[in-house]
Image (cartoon, rainbow, N blue to C red):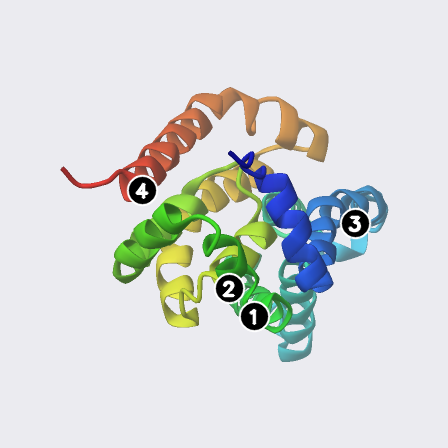
Amino acid sequence: MEKKRSIFKEFKEASRNNPKIALAVLWVSLMPSIGSFILVPWALHQSNWISLLDFSSPQVAFTALTLSTLLMGLAIMPTTLIAALSGFLLGWKAFPWLVLGYSLATLLGYAWGKGLGGQSLDFLLNKYPKAKGLIDQKRENLGELIFFVRLSPVIPFALSNLLFALLNSGWKKLILFGTMGMLPRTTLVFFSGTLVSDLYAALNTEGISGKGWIFSGLLLLSFWGIWRFFKPKT
């Protein structure tokens, strides 16, 4: 009997079928760390003038919105880190623009994934009829999956955009349920950034670590929701 091929081998085969998918997964896995390594020290060095930005100016608001959309939508920086930086450097005046930028970044990431993905997911799922049947059965309830994936503090934003693009979830569902799912953790991180006097503290002490139980709760809730979504009905 022929040995079953591993998921890695299937992905490798899918990558041969569509090399852009392999590059996209590599990009969303590595680029946020590289971008953060470069841009966070720069932002902190420029904090004096960044903190004085006036969001009542249409030019400033549009520039900040465009920049945040590109950084998140193209997976150049993690959304959580952008939220912490925004809270620390800009305060609550930036929060509505952050949420709007998140929504636009979702559209950008989804469009990017659709353009690159082609039929790669179908190619993989055709090898696993049970998994394909389960996803087809649950396709009408993808909003639930989107919500719990976005709620998770550990599932990368850009990677989930790529996943939902391959699943053909639809951009309206992704915007609606994705925004609802991201608000709790993003608000927490943003608020933490506004409370402390330096970014290190925002990321490691009172701002976030002190509220680690909230992150744990969000993580457990998201895992439960994702498990519940894929659990076959009895």
Label annotation for residue 106:
none
Q: Can you identify the residue that label 1 sits on?
A: 114
Q: Calculate the distance from the C-alpha at mark 4 to the C-alpha at mark 2.
A: 18 Å
Mark 2 or mark 1, which is nearer the start of the sequence? 1
- Above/below status of 115 relative to 162: below
Q: Calculate the distance from the C-alpha at mark 1 to the C-alpha at mark 4.
A: 23 Å
Q: Can you identify the residue that label 4 sits on?
A: 230
- Above/below status of 42 relative to 23: above
List the single residue furthest toward the front.
Answer: 1
Label annotation for residue 35:
3
Mark 3 or mark 2, which is nearer the start of the sequence? 3
Q: Are dots 1 and 2 in contact, CB under 8 Å?
A: yes
Q: Residue at x 26, y 62 (%)?
A: 140
What's under tag 3, amino acid-wise?
Gly
In front of the other: label 2 or label 3? 2
Q: Calculate the distance from the C-alpha at mark 2 to the C-alpha at mark 3.
A: 23 Å
Describe the element under mark 3 as helix, strand or loop.
Answer: helix
Q: Can you identify the residue that label 2 sits on?
A: 165
What's under tag 4, amino acid-wise?
Phe
